[in-house]
Image (cartoon, coloured by chain):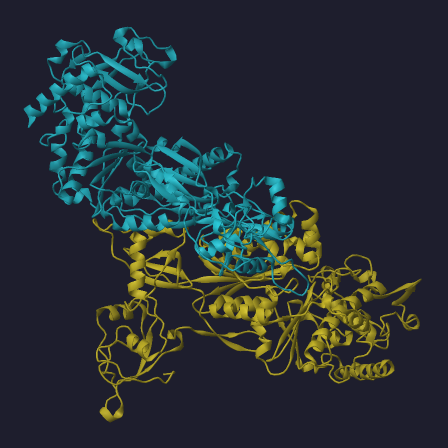
Chain colours: A yellow, B cyan
Amino acid sequence: MPSGRKGQVAAGTNLLQAAQELGVELESICGGRQTCGKCQIIVEEGHFPKHGITSRPDHLSPPAALEKEYDQEHNLNGRRLACAAQVEGDVLITVPEESQAHKQIIAKAATERVIEVAPAIRQLYVEIEPAILGDPRGDWERLAQALEDQWQLTDLEIDIKALPTLQSTLRQGDFAVTVTIWQDRKIIRLQPGFQEGVYGLAIDVGSTTVVAHLCDLRTGELLSTKSAMNPQVRYGEDLMSRVSYANSEPQGLKRMNRLIIQTLNELAEKATSEVNLSPQDVTDVVIVGNTVMHHILLGIHPTQLGVAPFALATYSALDLKARDLGLSLHPACQVHVLPLIAGHVGADNVGVMLAETPGEQDGVSLIVDVGTNAEIILGDRTQVLVASSPTGPAFEGAQITHGQRAAPGAIERVRIDPQTLEPRLQVIGYPEWIDPQAGDEVPPEMKATGICGSGIIEAIAEMFLAGIINSQGHFITSATERSPRVQLKGRTAEYILVEKELTATGSPIVITQNDVRAIQLAKAALYAGTKLLMDHRGIDRVDRVVLAGAFGSFINPFHAMVLGLIPDCDLDDVIAVGNAAGDGARLALLNRELRLKAVRLARAANYIETPLETTFQDEFVAALNLPHATHPFPHLAESLPDIPEDQVRERRNRVRARHGSRN
Amino acid sequence: MPSGRKGQVAAGTNLLQAAQELGVELESICGGRQTCGKCQIIVEEGHFPKHGITSRPDHLSPPAALEKEYDQEHNLNGRRLACAAQVEGDVLITVPEESQAHKQIIAKAATERVIEVAPAIRQLYVEIEPAILGDPRGDWERLAQALEDQWQLTDLEIDIKALPTLQSTLRQGDFAVTVTIWQDRKIIRLQPGFQEGVYGLAIDVGSTTVVAHLCDLRTGELLSTKSAMNPQVRYGEDLMSRVSYANSEPQGLKRMNRLIIQTLNELAEKATSEVNLSPQDVTDVVIVGNTVMHHILLGIHPTQLGVAPFALATYSALDLKARDLGLSLHPACQVHVLPLIAGHVGADNVGVMLAETPGEQDGVSLIVDVGTNAEIILGDRTQVLVASSPTGPAFEGAQITHGQRAAPGAIERVRIDPQTLEPRLQVIGYPEWIDPQAGDEVPPEMKATGICGSGIIEAIAEMFLAGIINSQGHFITSATERSPRVQLKGRTAEYILVEKELTATGSPIVITQNDVRAIQLAKAALYAGTKLLMDHRGIDRVDRVVLAGAFGSFINPFHAMVLGLIPDCDLDDVIAVGNAAGDGARLALLNRELRLKAVRLARAANYIETPLETTFQDEFVAALNLPHATHPFPHLAESLPDIPEDQVRERRNRVRARHGSRN
């Protein structure tokens, strides 16, 4: 139990061997030496009723000295060590979850999935013959022989950074050693005696944010997650600025490469020290990132990614040594880089595909990873299409008059009263909605400093819903009469979101005509890319919209749809999955088969080069309107969550009216 | 011609293809693009007489534009490019030596051999499809495809240090590139367009001297040889002192490792700059060295090599990256380390075996590599035995009162007049024999500073031949009456080789009783080891004695035999081969098959652990006598080369008399 397997074994066979014969995967590190305690099982019945009346498990050999010793030290609590208990008659055995080999974890993603923990590296305990005079073999050759005898592993190599530790480790452990082996072929770490604990990092290198997940590669457990700003932002917010920097500055690539490596080393230090480990304990790493981040991290000049035809240096998955990248982890630590798809669709997208598996879901999923470049995945069981749309950095607050990154003080949510045009706000770092009209006061240190990506999206959607701007994004002249917050200034205009008295800067925070235009351009690029993929697929609606990326988690689906950032769809089917790229990296870290799957997904994905599509420009222009010049958004009028009931009704009416007038 | 192959090919087949079909190996780098000029051939006859009367080679297609262009630039001098000339009738073609693939070189060794130049790395010229919009593949994938299409290579990898240069190199060469590939599976260097020149270093890391040979891996040519003192000597002359230093000093290993790496980098710089290359042009390295040097170079603590059972960390051949050792060569440069045999028999010995091939010679060869540890190889076609004897550093001038390393000012040759007991000397750096008795004067800067290994061997042998010491190595009391140069001082005694007026130091250079003893101990260890191997093999004489090692080249075989350093044998069959270990490294650099052969030789060698042999102590004691307490040396009286005729006769008589008296 619980596999339900049954069968006959020769009397005297121990339960570990019996499990192997029956195809039941039972954990073991020490290889049956009664020392690791991984193969503990529960004896349900020593024999079946037909054979007698007692349920005493006397159909197993009694515990001998070694097992008793283990029991005294670790308390078996009535369980037996499978490697010690020999079958002498019929028995019914339960393998508890912690003793099952290849533990499974639940993938935390939009679609919960069970993932088998079967990483690329594992630990093996082995005892080797001591060196003796007359045996010319080296310690490595004796170890390799022991690994063949005890673990059936052949054609092994040892990393040149592990080799120097071999002799002292063997003697420290009295010729017993725990080896960490990569892909069952290369020894990368040696520890004296019996040791437990093998750790890896899953890393997502984003243009703005870098995230590192530290995982226990035996249990699959996520031990800690640390993130930091990508320090390259000082050389440009968006990818193309970084490419330009590398092009114009002779040391630019080297400088950006060193900065990101240094950041990864710091994250590794933080993530490991939080759980009393050291970066030296990390022996495997999986990295994802967009194509420019990928190239810079590997020391490859990104210049080709800045000009057509956007040629990658390579789109293959890579197995590297951490030391060759300058990462200060275990000296022989491995690095696996997920494959890329095309010039603008990187390993981060492959991570998203691995985590979200659009090709395995019912119906058509649209996955958008909104960032400086929006990556778009459209897929179902028959086909997965991918594209990249150059949205620019507006969604991240750049190119916006008072835009800023998501940080304390940034306005992240906005509601505008459609009658009074008075706003209510949420500011990062302050838990309550702020209603200045109602006299809400905030502590001075919580005053707004600017507006971040999710705030700007909500603000412009609300301005549209409140009749401050029209569906073309133009300020409506008559709105100036409705509120002094709307000001026309010659050929331009602005909406005063926060008066200067209430800001941290002492200047008002405003949304200008230019800001609206910047968001329109960004969302039109995203929508047009999505539309192109839908056309390729021959569909005019999707069954599910997945917002990926940390930023995606903060976007309100209603407002995103009002802006026409995503196509019409039931709002209940719009879900945010957070850092799906990082989740994909974590999955590839925990399961080596998923690395092969990532390559299959990357190669099977049908990449649509949006600039090559003749209809892109037309789609782009049509998508500049809010939500769109021609496409209907039937779901918009119906599902308006998260909005007070009295506002909902009025909005519905207005939205219907506007749709009617435009279509 | 000259292979004599003949056959029929379809009309229109070019001569390069025809050669391939007929199994004639014809050089080509550009893959038949009429650019590299490697496949030049000489058209002997355009058709055979029976077909006509003219010998004009009209049975080949005439040169077209590309070939004419090549001719104008490089002057084909009447030859044709095989890849351009198409067969249209019977032709007789000579492939000149420089166009033959797999050129052969003569191995400079005791036994001259022909070695095929077939190194582990080679250059290939390839043209790839330019990147275009709509093709998501990376440049690497396009290059790999081109290598498959044009060179039938599959499953290729690219080194992470080569990958960053790919895109710029391809564009610089207009999508034509010369790749340097290791073992036909890993790309390690990329150069734009058509390039020629692939270089490697063969390195012998000796305890005292480090030698680097720079080789052209296309022609097999030895371009330059540089040597330097091993800077680790400051931490101990002999191997065991270095092991002690590493044991006693926490930073000792690291320090010695850095010093040797630094020295190798300096040698690479010198060897390459001499021929206008740079260390970056070196893409392959083969390293040999004794076991302690091997371990220190790889960063492995040598402590186990200092205590029984003398366990090696590994005895396998290793393929490494130069960068992982800290070598400043091409960033993706490969390193191959030849295998070891046992705790005291290293890769240097495998190099010697590879160069001298005792297992392929008629008769039994004895090869001794005299150094701090003497390595002994005894072999013929049936069996190869190896052993190591701890001779200590006496042969290298250490532990000798006025001993010094072989350097200008060191006495390297000594003759003692058996009548007058007056010496004649040769000093390193001065071309003439110096006879102080004859009033020879030398420039002050050429005065003797001490005596080096070969000098001490000759001096003691001459002292024995002149009756100053007896066969037990004791000073003969009566000798003091024959010359004031012999002085007894209580329990000890000395022979004044150079009076203080004639030395650079102002002190006399003397050979003391202790010096004689030190040489006796060293030579007895070597002889006893040799004798053990001969006993194992069941022989009492050898057919050939090979003195390997730079030092071996300076030993006079006659004096070595008088001392009983080597067993009796015809003096004509005692040969010095210089740095055979380095020669072996060079062979493995030039031919990848020899790397596999080295592993076979190392594993097939029968290692005799001398301390395990119960007879070793007895053999050692018997070998303390000059030349030996019991073994006859019949050849000693007969061949005395390099000695003036008048001395020869007297010596012969004395030697005969002594042999008679001792046996």
Res. A276 in view: no
Left or right, residue A656 beside residue A298:
right
- Which of the pair A341/A639 is nearer the observer? A341
Residue drawn where x is 33% and y is 8% of the image:
B441
> Is the residue B229 above or below the residue B614 in the image?
above
- Pinpoint residue A253: horizontal percent, then vertical percent: 63, 49
State which quadrant residue B249 falls in: top left
- Which of the pair A378/B652 is nearer the observer? B652
Residue drawn where x is 27% and y is 7% of the image:
B438
Q: Quadrant of the C terminus of chain A?
A: bottom right
Left or right, residue A73 beside residue A579:
left
Q: Quadrant of the N terminus of chain A?
A: bottom left
Q: Residue furthest bottom?
A: A50
> Is the residue B116 above or below the residue B240 in the image?
below
Left or right, residue A207 beside residue A18:
right
- Pinpoint residue A124: horizontal percent, then vertical percent: 35, 63
Give the number of marks: 0
- Pinpoint residue B566: horizontal percent, then vertical percent: 19, 32
> Is the residue B153 above or below the residue B541 in the image?
below
> Is the residue B520 above or below the residue B4 in the image?
above
State which quadrant residue B401 falls in: top left
Res. B548 in view: yes
- Pinpoint residue B11: horizontal percent, then vertical percent: 54, 58
Residue drawn where x is 23% and y is 36% of the image:
B390
Q: Residue furthest top?
A: B439
Left or right, residue A329 beside residue B300:
right
- Which of the pair B181/A465 is nearer the observer? B181
State which quadrant residue B542 falls in: top left
